[in-house]
Image (tube, coloured by chain):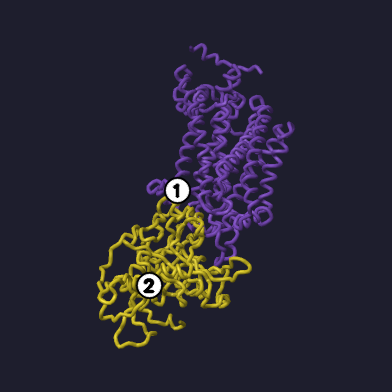
Amino acid sequence: MNITFDQLVDDLAPKKFSWKGKLWVVFLVIVILIGLYAYIQQLRQGLIITGMRDYALWGVYISNFVFFVAISLVGSLITAILRLSGVHWSTPLTRIAEIIAVAAIIMAGLTIIIDMGRPDRMLNLFIHGRLQSPIIWDVIVITTYLAISILLLYYPLLPDFGILKTHAQESPRIRKWYSTLSLNWSGTNDQRRIYSRSIQALSVLIIPVAFAIHTVTAWLFETTYRPGWDSTNFGPYFIAGAFVAGAGAVVAVMFVLRKTYGLENYITDEHFNKMGKILVLLCLVYLYFNINEYLMPTYKSTEEEAVHLRSLFTGQYASLFWTAIIGGLVLPVIVLLFPQGRRPLPLFIVSLAVVIGAWWKRYIIVIPTLSHPFLPIQGVPESWRHYSPTWMEWSITLATLAAALLIITILVRFLPIIPIQETAEEKGIIRVTQINES
Amino acid sequence: MEHNHEKDNKSRRTFLDKGLKIGVLAAAGSVALAKVFGNKTDEILDEETVELMSMDGTLMQVPASQVEVHPEKKIDYNPREGFPKRKFVMVVDLAKCRNAKKCQSSCNKNHYITGDNAWIKIYKMQDNEKSAPYWQPTLCQHCDEPPCVKVCPVDATFKRRDGIVLIDNNRCIGCRFCMAACPYSVRIFNWSDPWQGEMAESIPYSPDYSGVPAQKGTVDKCDFCPHMIDKGELPHCVSACPNDVFSFGDLYEDAVTNGSGQTFQLSKLLKERAGYRLMENLGTQPSVYYLPPSNRVVEFEEGLENYTEFKSVDKTDEI
């Protein structure tokens, strides 16, 4: 493939939305507005509008929160781990991964606020925060992760902003933004040195923080005595699951973007093949943790665990449980073991199954445990024994998912989805003007 | 024993007021704690007597004239710190419980509970198929190692020096982590506006009178009634129980008093009756002790007619 630098920029520069893109944005905004209406009702009437009650005290808000945290981990996987191990094929995927990570971690933060009974007192977390509480750990690591993720999205963009401020087919106003955001990037050796060292440092930093966000999220459950949560396996189990969900999300988004913007030359079938291989490995690791998580308690079958496990294996949650395990984990592994399964379209379908399965898996982790407290459930209305989300709860949850997609969509509109400068360097395409200048 | 609960209500109320603030002269040199009341069930004496307990737990009648009362001035105490030099405990005698539910209705009424989940529940329990069923009144266990306090991100729920675990509803952010952490399921959430009526809403808020007034979006639970202790009275559930299931007192004084005003030596009671605590294995160190349902005073079946599986707050009872 022989193309000039200008062609490359034309290919990769952000594009205005087509009518399909506009329709997509309108759709997302409508979903968000419905959720916003439901949330206003929740603020007025209290959490009574949800299906949660004193026994099922956490519901889809929390499982959705865990899902967002899980998805956000992908930023560290693709960007940091692959970057640090000197893998170059993943360059075109790094920005997609970081965009997903930033969107997911922002929505994780908002979702946890949605779950609060008194969001008006949120500042108490800072005024009266107690370091002994896992929630404060979560506040600390999520804000840290958000900051590092934004930097890790932003720094590699500096040269691209520098390119776009002159090349973009954009209005002068937007080009001015690019110019401001480029922080006067001109590609001098000094700038390059600081640039690559910063990215290197951030890539190292983000890995322990990423592990921390999901480990702490696992600890929110693990710090209680409840059967189903009282497991020493929870931290690594959550992290393994998060990598699966995040890798699935990257595959799904890269498929859609490649098709929408005709990026077949940059996101190739080989990228899908490789991501498929990564996904199958991650699924197998997660499956291994699942076996640890469920088989040993089943073997011992203490009374409390047995009640909980029965509800998962054969009881009320059995269909969800087995669909998530088989549809979201076992079948994807089988399909992805075959090269044909790693072609773009089959992999896209598998990745959707993985992501949806991952969402429901969080539901299965959070909700059933709460229906099996140590003391019997007595003296409360019968409906309190089971949890099912109300339509308002669903609309709020769907709105958070739509908001995450909207953040991704807006970032895709204004940022080059594939790093221009890095791609140019890897393909050996030289910017002619640059040579003249120097 | 049936007529016990008919005894002068006043005697129950005076439990701490006089009982704990009494200075003892003459007859009982080594007396630690006393309980004062004119006991109408005993043989009538011309002079009013006072029942006192010695250190080894024997009860004795002492003429009231020989007892000198040192009235203590009411301490202006900090609700976050608790009463100084006190450590409150409760003993629940399962052999006496017949699910009369007076504890529950009294608690519901006095804490203006408008939700669907009472703070004190009388569970129908049966440990295994072959063993006998029993009624287990369950309230906040006021653990010495409270898992709820451990996880609270904003120090809204806290442990006082006198052993009581309370909630500051003005600070609670409604994350419900404490509810997830509590293995005894005693915490309830105000899912909607409590609508308690003018009475409750006119009382100024203090953490030591839980639920008055309740606040939407925050957690509530049994508070061991510090607002009653402060007045020298027993918690509502203790004084409401017609069967003397509950005894309440102070671990440092090694004494607990039941609703009829009888005082027992705590250590002796727990030793003799093999007292235990719920889920000891979790290491939560509860302040509530249970006496096993053996040698029962009442039949289990008596409680069945009162049993409501799906209700613990009778809203028709209320004003």
| SS under mark 2 | loop
Amino acid type assigned to the residue bearing label 2 in the image: Gly
Chain the render paints purple: A
- Determine which residue is flagged by label 2: B57
Mark 2 nearby-residue class (10 Å; few <14, some 14–19, many ≥20): many
Q: In which image quadrant can residue A284 be found?
A: top right
Q: Nearer the viewer, residue A17 or B280?
A: B280
The residue under the point 46% across, 44% down is A137
Q: Nearer the viewer, residue A345 or A331?
A: A331
Chain the render paints yellow: B
- Determine which residue is flagged by label 1: A133
Residue B179: percent from the left, percent from the top? 49, 56
Instruction: Tell me if residue B179 comes above or below residue A339 in the rendering.
Output: below
Residue B211: percent from the left, percent from the top? 42, 64
The residue under the point 55% across, 46% down is A232
Q: On the same chain: label 1 and label 2?
A: no
| SS under mark 1 | loop
Instruction: Tell me if residue A281 comes above or below residue B94 in the rendering.
Output: above
Circle 1 marks a residue in which chain? A
The residue under the point 61% across, 40% down is A245
Instruction: Tell me if residue A127 comes above or below residue B230 in the rendering.
Output: above
Q: Is any part of residue A396 visible from this angle?
A: no
Q: Is residue A202 left or right of residue A25?
A: left
Q: Nearer the viewer, residue B183 or A167?
A: B183
Q: Is residue A413 left or right of residue A148?
A: right
Q: Is any part of residue A101 visible from this angle?
A: yes
Q: How many marks?
A: 2
